[in-house]
Amino acid sequence: MQTSPTREVALVVGVATAGVLTAALLVIGPVAAADSPRYPQVTDVRTPIQPQP
């Protein structure tokens, strides 16, 4: 199977890009999951405080 150099380079670039994106998702996923507990605090601040009777 003879492939042109341009197609070969495009294939390598495509595979490398997919690998980088996959690695980025693997790194960002746990970090975003670890940060998620901070977000409910924002909703807690927005909830109105009930006045004491």
Image (cartoon, grey):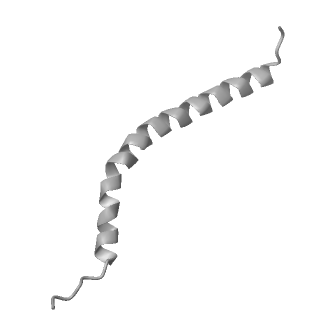
In the image, farthest residue toward the top: 1
Give whichever of 27, 37 is nearer the camera. 37
- The residue sitting at 45% across, 35% down in the picture is 26
Q: Quadrant of residue 46?
A: bottom left
Residue 27 horizontal/vertical position (percent): 42, 38
Residue 42 relative to residue 11: left or right: left
Residue 39 relative to residue 25: left or right: left
Give whichever of 30, 47 is nearer the camera. 47
Give whichever of 11, 33 is nearer the camera. 33
Residue 12 relative to residue 50: left or right: right
In the image, farthest residue toward the front: 53
- The residue sitting at 48% across, 38% down in the picture is 24
Q: Quadrant of residue 11?
A: top right
Residue 36 horizontal/vertical position (percent): 35, 54
Which quadrant, please, contains the C terminus?
Answer: bottom left
Residue 12 horizontal/vertical position (percent): 67, 24
Which quadrant, please, contains the N terminus?
Answer: top right
